[in-house]
Image (tube, grey):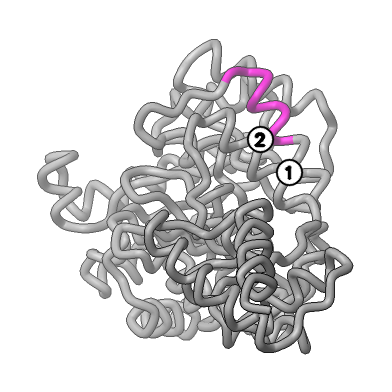
Amino acid sequence: MPSKIIINDTTLRDGEQTAGVAFTTDEKVKIAILLDHMGIQEIEAGIPAMGDIEKKAIKKILNKNLKARIIGWNRAVYKDIDESINCGLNSISISLPVSDIHIRYKLNKTRKWIIEQIKKAIGYAKKHKLYLIVSAEDASRADFDFLLEYIKTIKKEGADRFKFCDTMGILEPFRMFDMIRHICQAVEIDIEVHTHNDFGLATANALAGISAGANFVDTTVNGLGERAGNAALEEIVMALKYIYEIGLKIDVKRLPEISRFVSKASGREIPQGKPIIGKNCFLHESGIHQDGIIKKPLTYESFEPSVIGKRNQLVIGKHSGKAAIRDFFEKKGTMVNDDIAGKILRKVRYSSTVLKRCLSDSEIYSLYKGVLDRNANRV
C-alpha cells in the first residue's frame, strides 16, 4: 500500500455526466467548498472547453482560494488546454483512448497517431508550466504492451502522473491488482485509478488498484457518474479508514451533509441501502442482530454511527425478537417480562406480515395494550 493516498473527487465533472444531471454554478461552487472543508485534496472542477457557463463556475471555484488542487479536464488538443489556461487553472488532466476499439471506431486513428498526439499535448501543456495528469481512456481493454508504451511515453515527455481508466467498468479486483502492479513494476510514475460501476465493482476495483500501488484515486459523491456511476467518495474514504486503517485527514462527519446536498442538486435520491450514507445502514430488525446491538453495538456495526454523525436504530417488525421488544419498552420507561414480550412479538409478526412493513411506536403500544387487556379479562 502507498504511504499516502490522494483523493481526486470528480463529482463536478464525471459525476455531472450522469444522464440528466446538470449543476448550477452556485451548486458547483457549494459542492467544491463542501469537498474542500472535508479535506478532499483534489477536485476535478469541470471541462473548460464546454463553454462560458462551465468556465464561469471553474473561475468562481478558483476565486474561493480553496486548499484543494483544482483540476480541469481536457481532450488532448491545444484548444482545450488553452481554455483551461484562460480559466486560470494550473493543473489539468488530458485524455486519449488507448483501446483498439476506441482508437479505430471512435477516432478512426492508429496507435501511432495516439502516441504522437499525446506527445504534442504534453509538450504544449508543459510549455505553459501546468501540473499534468495524463489519462488512458479504456485502459482496461487496451493491449497491455501498447498501454505500457503509452505510459512510458508520457513519463518521458514530462507528465506528472498517469490515470488508469476502467472506462467500461469491466475489470474485477484481482485483474485490476495485477494490471496496476505490472505498471508499477514497469514504469516509475504516480498512478491514479478511475473506476466505473457497471458491474458493481467500482469501489472494489479502486481499492484493488490502491493495494497494487496506485496512490491517487477518483471518486464521486454518492457514486454519481456515467451509466451505473463511479466509485463513491463515502465508500472509498470509509473503507480506507476502517478496512485499510489509512488516515486521510478527512472529516468524515461531513459525509452526510455533502451527500444530501449532492442528492438534492442532482435530483438523484439516495437508496435506502446505500453503503455508509443510506437510511438503512444502521437500521436493525433481525432479532439476532438486535440482541447483539443491545449488548454491544460493534457486534453488528463495523464502526460507530456517531463517527459520521448518525445513530443506530432498532425497528420492530416480522424478524424482531423478544430482546428488542423488551428494549423498546424499557427505553419508554416500561418494564415488560418475557411472557408479555413473547405475546406482543407474535402479534407484531402477524401485523408486520399483513402490513408488509415495520410497526410504528403507536402500533406497538396498541398491541401491548391488547395483550394486557386480554390478560386482565382472563383474570
Tell me how far mark 2 sits from mark 1, CA to CA: 6 Å
Q: Position of residue 174 (x, y in %)?
A: 37, 85
The type of residue carrying mark 1 is: Glu
Magenta residues (range): 24-32
Report the residue marked by disc 2. Answer: 261
Q: Amino acid at mark 2?
A: Phe
Which quadrant is home to the C terminus? bottom right
Q: Residue furthest right?
A: 333
Q: Which residue is mark 1?
A: 257
**Residue 11 appears left or right of 201:** right
Q: Callout 2: helix, strand or loop?
A: helix
Is 195 within the magenta? no
* Picture mark count: 2
Would residue 244 be seen by someone viewing this image from the given angle? no
Q: Position of residue 328 (x, y in %)?
A: 74, 70
Give the residue displayed 55% in from the left and 82% down from the top.
211
